[in-house]
Amino acid sequence: MRTVTDIITAENLTVILILLPFAAALGVFFIRSARLQSVVVLVTGCLLIASALLLIPLTPFQFSPRPILGLSLNTVVQSLDFLLLVIILYFGVRHRKVIITALALFQICFLAYFEFFMIRGHQPSVIFLGDNLSLIMILIVAVVGSLICFQAIPYMREHEAERNLKKSRQHRFFFVMVLFLSAMNGLVLSNDMVYFYFFFEITTLCSFLLIAHDGTPLAITNALRALWMNSLGGAAFILALIGIYAETGTIEFQKLLISGEFGQGILQLSLVLLCLAAITKSAQFPFQSWLLGAMVAPTPVSALLHSSTMVKVGVYLVLRLTPALNHTFLSQCVALFGAFTFISAAALAVGQSNGKKILAYSTISNLGLIFACCGLNTAESLTAAMLLIIFHAVVKALLFLCVGAIEQHIASRDIEQMRGLYADMPLTALITVMGVIMMIMPPFGMLLSKWMAMESAAANIYVILMISLGSALTVMYWARWAGTLMSYPFTGKFKPERQPWLTWIALGSLCAGAGLLSIGAPWLYLKMVLPVLGGQYLPPFSTHQGILDNPTGVFAVVPLSVVAILGLFVAILAVRKATDARVVSPYLSGSQSTTPGMFVGPLNRLVEAGAKNYYLSTIFGERRLTPWINIGAVVLLTLMAGGAL
Amino acid sequence: MTRTLITIIAALLAGPLLGGLALGLDRILTARLQSRIGPPLLQPFYDVIKLWGKEKIVVNIWQAFCAYCYVAANSIALVLFFLQSDLLLILFILAVGAVFLVVGALASTSPFSQIGAHRELLQILTYEPLLILVTMGIYLETGSFKITTVMAWDRPLLIKLPFLFVVLGYALTIKLRKSPFDLSTSHHAHQELVKGLLTDYSGPFLALIELGHWYEVVLLLGLCSLFWATNPAAMVVLVIGTYMAEILIDNVTARLNWRWMLGYIWAMGLTLSTLNLIWLYVS
């Protein structure tokens, strides 16, 4: 008789986390009833969330699966790896993209060399390894990912209705979305780099398929761009794999990291290549264009792949490698490069009025900050990096979903068109403003992590210069957006608009989740982050009464949250009391007419009064800045590579 | 515990008292520089009390929300300063106030208020990095962001951070809404934007904004005083000197446009900060 605890083992949960979405994806693909598809997605999402939560007490763990039906898992993964590359090759040939074809062939050749000549008969000792870093990612993928998939159900229904499709393509969409969840779970649990590479390539392919989903010429062009840039990352990864195996004889993260010397030579060069793979995956400069192009995809895709999970693979990889980077020139380069991306992407975001592009640049910018934290490589900065991964995933997913809901309502993603959205969609507008506040204000988690990042960067002048300028730019583009949403001469009572209930569930739980996680940040730090730092670093903070404290600084998370909640309460009371205040029309030099927003012009004609936002495109315009930023990024990448020689 | 409580109450009272007096002094001195007699010292208090008693008028109820948040953020920042907390955290909380002020102004559709709000954002963009770099300098000198450590430091910060003090002066000029940087709104309602970002705030809500500004002024002057924290008398002298200089600059300069502000302050401010930080880094 088996008890429940026998069934809930780390092995079984891992199998559920990886294989359940895979099976569900196949199910969704073959079920053509929209209702049944939704049920499958909902059930899968709930099971994933439950498994991820159950995994918390079982971490850390490690295991290698036994052969299935006489086939070792290695053989299966190897064959599937080649299959994947052949699919990518097929897309390259079909769309006549030489670079994709070339990169796919390159990867096939090197992978064949690696598999058949170098590691032939090599048996990895530990294939799957779950530590707290993997657990953080698993929780993000399972919880945030599932919530995004939930919202995708009503979103895609509306999306297809708008586009007047004769034949639904939702089965294809949800197939890739759910398959992606499986790949992400596999990726973050892989200890063997061949497995990691396999899942890495699946995410690339998923991203390609989802960007191209709408099938418009623009979507296909952008999807192909994403494919070649990510394939470049894949190619760098396979070269790094060969280099690492040749030097150390292992391709397991765990063994590699405890092996020690990474000083110079081929091993150092391999690390540079891994960083390059990470940089392409996280869409850092000069590879940012694929992420911006990816914004043509339906918004749940942007929320899932291009903000909260897939682009985090890059920073996850670098975070894994930080013990190897410690005290190297490469580490300093990564810090510099990350800080450079942080400020550059923030500057470009200031020049944008397209809401999704602002979110994309902000994502690139925050990933840059995480890179910078990894490069600084102190206990404090690594804590900041992990907290940033968590909070950014939740808050940015929330903002993307808000923009998705808004976009379907007003048929535009331009923030000028969102002017006064509060009058139209009060609750969505308020949740969006809340999301913005959680991005830039204390005591919320994003700012807590940024505070840690800044305090740990203080000793590095160039990094701190860029971070301080970048964070001011960040405040500028977020505050502008929040203000624009509220910009309406509002008088009436608060009455929430109608939205599908799944949308409210997704928005509500992400918003509440981000708030609660922020208050719980000290415990998040104790239970999740500290075990990752392990024995290598001294604990960067002491916690008492919800206050994070160390000799250099102090952040009273819980007391400040309590004060903030009280303040919010008072301010809301003030709003309620202000409803009985006399309402006047906005000041128009005393010549306002009785029609709101119009003033009496010459010859008593009514003229509309209006002001648009400052985008300062002469300074922060894409055309003006991008070439220089790309050059800067290439210079820094060259510096990084040169240091290894 | 009681000590903490007393400090909090002291901070909450000191903000309006000292801030109002500073503003009153400013008005008298400015008047004298312009060959006027000027109002009594307590005029700012009379103004705020009168505003508080006026009818509530709004163009958008979220203005009320933003006004309260502005006061709350600034007073919390000052309380943390009195509790000798983390400098960087205090700056972040101060930024919260600034952002709410902007959002409140953007909530009105009046073009005056809108343009004022955008100019305010540019001002934030200009001074925010400088203030952060000043705290970085303090960290490099004392090894901590905590004010407790700064107060215990046995040597005036000014000796090692002279350029950063100048940089703080730039930020202070913008924050105090003094010429040549009073772009978004100014104390004198004779600019092209009427009252800029405050155009559509009135009555009790304007009183709240004024109160919030007092907290801000006291905090920033407090930040200046940290540069000679070894001696209480020197602290007072340094603060009064700086404040006088600000009033003088206000009266001898004319307002400039945002391009000039951003270009000049970033060029000068960042150069001076970098220089000073490199000194600290080398020594």
Image (cartoon, coloured by chain):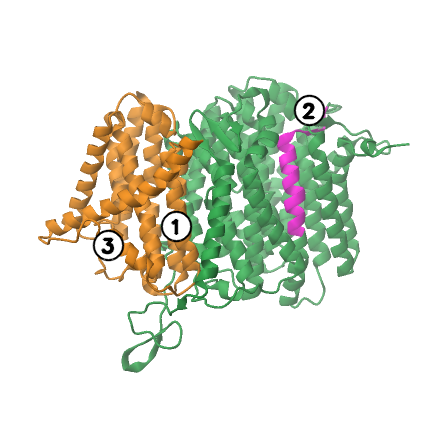
Chain colours: A green, B orange
- Dot 1, how many residues are within 10 Å of its Cα: few (below 14), some (14-19), or many (20+)? many
Task: Confirm whether circles 2 and 1 share one chain.
Answer: no
Q: Residue at x 86, y 34 (%)?
A: A69
Q: Residue at x 61, y 19 (%)?
A: A258
Q: Quadrant of residue A526?
A: top right
| Residue identifier under label 1 | B70
Drawn side of residue B9 relative to residue A235, left or right: left
Q: Residue at x 76, y 52 (%)?
A: A40
> Can you say which quadrant of the picture contains the N terminus of chain A?
top right
Q: Chain of mark 2?
A: A
Q: Is residue A490 above or below residue A478?
A: below
| Residue identifier under label 3 | B187
| Residue identifier under label 2 | A118
- Dot 3, how many residues are within 10 Å of its Cα: few (below 14), some (14-19), or many (20+)? few
Where in the figure is residue A205, as x and y percent of width and height?
65, 45
Q: Residue furthest front?
A: B2
Three-letter code for the amino acid on which mark 2 is drawn:
Met
Q: Which mark is nearer the camera, 2 or 1?
A: 1
Q: Which residues are magenta?
A: A126-149
Three-letter code for the amino acid on which mark 3 is drawn:
His
User: Is residue A362 among what the camera can see?
Assistant: no
User: Is residue B100 among what the camera can see?
Assistant: yes
Drawn side of residue B1 relative to residue A232, left or right: left
Q: Earlier in the sequence, mark 1 or mark 3?
A: 1
Residues A108 and B152: in front is B152
Q: Chain of mark 3?
A: B
Q: Is residue A590 magenta?
A: no
Q: Which mark is nearer the camera, 3 or 2?
A: 3
- Secondary structure beneath disc 2? helix
Spatial separation of the CA atoms under disc 2 and disc 1: 64 Å
